[in-house]
Image: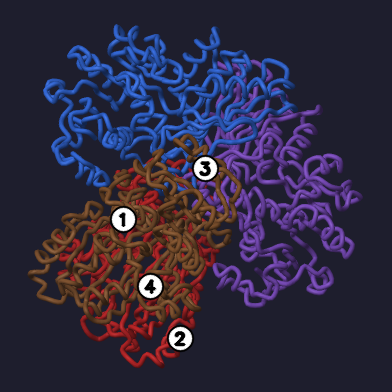
Chain colours: A purple, B blue, C brown, D red
């Protein structure tokens, strides 16, 4: 964290995504953290809530406060990261924007173009539908320019990132049949949030793996929205998330039917992936016959991609790995922030 | 373990499958363990190699020996469980059978009807092709009678069990399109065996999940063989196994296209599963909209089955969980042994 | 579980200790479970609450009920296991005893002889002090006869069991200086109970080890009481428990000063341990220069003991391992139950 | 990693300590990695051996080579980190020093002042006893000046660091009786090294905790050497290390007898710790009645210290936590390197 840096607030900073945002922002060379909020932890110092951050420069000045917009403004924040539950986030984003603060929202509130899709997948009315037209879906690899100019960035979900990054180029180049997509993802327990829920206790999660949320997990809505845009046709996917006993990481394995001849698929996939991501430093192309391992991306902003081609079934199977709190949440949000500020995209994010 | 019980030898008893066989046989009320072999541990007592078994009745008489057929015969064994690498197993099975010992082989050597499939998936010539016609694929839920009368049972692989048990009824009843099968499985590290391999160290497996072996993992061969028999047509499947940081357990998530109308699928799947497995005490039907959790089957011989129907994609997604060392290996082999001896199928296996 | 067996109720059956009691009682050859209570789960079937138990014989008849004494009596229970919080347990035990039901209490309420020690360590007044004189501290290896005749058994805590079993013989035989005891224990997360507490989430416990509760953890009170009785003098100990990321298991490492000459210590310790526990099938003496591993006792009723002698410091360092839910809770309680019923001490407990 | 930075070689870079050194040096703002060696991986690129480092600036130039001194010199290295087995390290250090390269040795070869202690604890003759007088024990908190001027730094072991940092001030200030020390430490599996050893497989380490190496673990030799120097008298300690199922982290719990009155101990300990470490940014004093948690120091160079005072036994119990690969190995070595180069002590190490 830098004195006299870009002034940043983190709203909802006491959960796992908030903690990862703080971790990265404390080490970011261009950022000055000026406010962090949490209803639950208001009044406690940052070092008290997260003793692991003790010793970070400037940390002694930081105390959790209530999420009061006036106070956040008074702290001088020019940017706010929102790590709040959906619905809550939308209302606060609106207030902050009206006070001139640019917002990177990590909730689902501004990810869906269509407020009826929001109602279908999240229930209830959208909290601020008039903001939807100006919100940008914050996948930097796809929307660098739009993000750079946006005042409201809707940072993608962890599962969608792990599925969209590998699939968008394949769908755009018509290498795969967009109607054939089946994705199976395994996620670490931090993805379930810091909730006092018995099903998330160590004893319940350890030595266990289990699917959940299928067939209509909320994240399907943004996966289908972005794939449909890329395909130029409506895309419907199958998606099954699983919970496994690791703290961080998502591995996605995605079955797709090849749209063209299997003989040339190997060259086409490789060429497409490399071309599409040649300027994307956080997408690491592992290549054919390599599978991504969450261990290699843990605590980083990288997403690793590998694949195999199965001539027997004429299918392409894609494998991705990311840190659900990194590229799947906090890291990616900061990547957008860097773009919004004309900084190098990897500023403060080139960690290993 | 019972004195004066059915005399049993365990060949290759020092690996994880061997250890699980010993664990279950030591507690089996009708079995007398008379011989256990391991080239590596020959000469050491059972309690020394597996201190966790100390205190089991009769254990003090048991010492690992070399896998010498004459000695095994001299010990009076009437049954032998073979927990050996493929190729090695076939030769030994032949010798034991010729001496009148009934064999339950846990290797791949007698699982494939066709020795050319063996050559394709396992490499090299089959060690005893003339025995193939008489070997029975030891999935008790499907072949109770054949197993009861067999002298040579080829106990199925862990992944195949987790995929065949849910799919065979669906394929036989033509509820799903057999050409549409894509399976994603996650397995605990004990499935990789007790090998001094750096990639299996705690530090490499912990906080990691990774796919491997696709698109042509060896276990595909027996999955396709049995599904083809059930479907009455050649079936080719996609299958991606993953390694995850748990000791025991396999969870399989299988995407299938519904063959008939989606409206009646719910009732048809439920009815088929219940009917098919009504006398199979180890298959627990969890029902629609429930996912199987490896935690509930760990150290048991159960396999749990749940599923969801996705009307948006007209697909059925099936979820199974088993213990890879239990129903996926040692437990299932003993289930066959019980059938071969006219014992209750669950004798010694009703553990929780 | 046996029809027409000894009729047993489990009170407070929805936590981890309750679950382990149920697991063992469902497999116990002489027990008929007639009632299980849980305020939280009342009205739900056993299979619904613990799907892992589905398929156990007789389970379909079992439904959680409110802990109402009249109902428990009406179910015909002759024995009740109490897996309740301290203070709550005492009152209920009193009611059950007055109705002729023999009680094995797994709470702390009847472990301390002295109600002022209870007040000091647990706070508040003892719920039923007049019952203390008749309660027996249920460490079967030390008090077989008393337990056999008792109506109220106070089953020991998990940490005390792991420390008392190795130390009592050494203190009684004056091999160690009773004022020199320092114990460091590491426990699995199930020992902390099934509570919706953020500090017990997978993400908080995984990749973490931390001490807690020292220097005056509640379990010290019963450790000191029993060691003082064994030593014939007041004993005060240091004890530091730790939480580590395993589900089950306690390993205790205990530093003691040798009371006599170091030269003869090796023989004296070995002889004492072997003699003291020669009829105790659940105490496995690993011997000198061997350390106990929780992996070998997990899901069993065994406690393993090893030790080293350090001539440089003239100290004896003892190592024990047990399953905190097994020998440290449910298994041990059933061991007492077996004694109370004249059954073999290992009845239903010889699992591996 | 910086072009035109201080030229550094890492010798023995393929193990876990080597990997952590690389991780930190790749991100170090003043370092240019010019050579990395590994007999096993010679010829393979850094990105191939450690795919997690792909994307680090400059990494494409780095390939593992044989540990040939001429080649290392030719690469222009001015500093070499040695992450080699003891005995191997000593010889290579000598060659490198003779060519003008300053050495930070992470093996045990130069930690003991006395080559006879080396022979006692490590066996065999010391490989380069004439270098011992000039080697500095690289605990920066104690020996900043000596390290700054040294050509050969012997970086301490992981367990010793976790025990010496809390104890040295207490011993120097005579707050504790130096003859009373008993330390119990639990370490993550990465501390056992990257060895193809069955006892380190995931399946063997998971759900297990076990002591090992006591009563005379090799690390005792340097613990006693440094405590004796601090105490001005010969100190002998009890030390029991344990292996637990986490990847990184050591927690040490240390029992000490208070030398002075228990009443004033609280103030004296607090004042001593704070004074002693007031300029040591990596020592975080948690204070009385707080226990250190490995989770808070993982992947950092911090060591956290807490303690409790037990008036009943007149003992002080100290708790420390560090990352065995960080402050316990690679991080601490770089801390010394920073001092040797007149850099800020925390340069490249202030990670969270």
Which residue matches tag 2?
A: D270
- Distance from label 2 to label 1 (Cα)? 53 Å
Q: Which residue in the structure is indicated by mark 3?
A: C62
Q: Which mark is residue C302?
A: none
Q: In the rendered view of the protein, which quadrant contains the C terminus of chain B?
A: top left
C-alpha span from label 4 to label 2: 43 Å
**Residue located 34% across and 82% down the image:** D315
Q: Residue at x 31, y 35 (%)?
A: B24
Residues under labels 4 and 3: Cα distance? 33 Å
The label on residue C340 is 1
Where is C165 relative to B69, above or below? Answer: below
Quadrant where the image shows the N terminus of chain B: top left
Q: Are marks 4 and 3 in contact (CB under 8 Å)?
A: no
Give the alpha-carbon distance from disc 3 to disc 1, as whole Å: 25 Å
Label of residue C132 in the image = 4
Residue sticking out furthest to the right:
A130
In this view, the residue in front, B246 or A337, is B246
Residue B23 image-quadrant placement: top left
């Amino acid at each position: 964290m830098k004195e006299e840096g870009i002034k940043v607030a983190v709203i909802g900073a006491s959960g796992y995504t908030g903690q990862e945002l703080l971790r990265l922002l404390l080490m970011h060379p261009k950022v000055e953290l000026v406010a962090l909020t949490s209803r639950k932890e208001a009044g406690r110092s940052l070092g008290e809530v997260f003793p692991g951050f003790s010793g970070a420069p400037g940390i002694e000045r930081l105390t959790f406060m209530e999420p009061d917009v006036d106070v956040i403004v008074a702290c001088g924040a020019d940017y706010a990261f929102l790590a709040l539950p959906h619905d809550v986030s939308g209302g606060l984003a609106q207030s902050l924007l009206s006070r001139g603060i640019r917002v990177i929202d990590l909730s689902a509130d501004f990810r869906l173009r269509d407020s009826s899709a929001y109602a279908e997948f999240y229930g209830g009315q959208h909290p601020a539908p008039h903001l939807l037209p100006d919100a940008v879906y914050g996948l930097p690899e796809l929307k660098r320019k739009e993000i750079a100019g946006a005042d409201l960035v809707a940072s993608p979900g962890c599962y969608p990132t792990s599925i969209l990054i590998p699939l968008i180029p394949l769908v755009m180049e018509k290498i795969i049949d967009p109607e054939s997509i089946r994705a199976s993802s395994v996620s670490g327990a931090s993805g379930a949030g810091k909730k006092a829920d018995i099903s998330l206790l160590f004893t319940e999660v350890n030595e266990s793996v289990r699917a959940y949320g299928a067939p209509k997990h909320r994240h399907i809505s943004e996966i289908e929205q972005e794939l449909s845009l890329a395909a130029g046709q409506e895309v419907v996917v199958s998606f099954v998330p699983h919970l496994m006993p690791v703290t961080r990481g998502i591995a996605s394995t995605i079955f797709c039917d090849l749209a063209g001849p299997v003989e040339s698929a190997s060259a086409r996939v490789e060429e497409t992936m490399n071309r599409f991501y040649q300027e994307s430093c956080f997408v690491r192309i592992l290549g054919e016959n390599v599978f991504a391992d969450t261990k290699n991306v843990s605590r980083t902003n990288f997403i690793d991609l590998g694949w195999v081609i199965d001539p027997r079934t004429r299918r392409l199977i894609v494998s991705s790995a990311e840190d659900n709190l990194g590229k799947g949440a906090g890291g990616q949000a900061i990547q957008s922030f860097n773009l919004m500020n004309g900084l190098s995209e990897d500023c403060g994010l080139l960690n290993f």
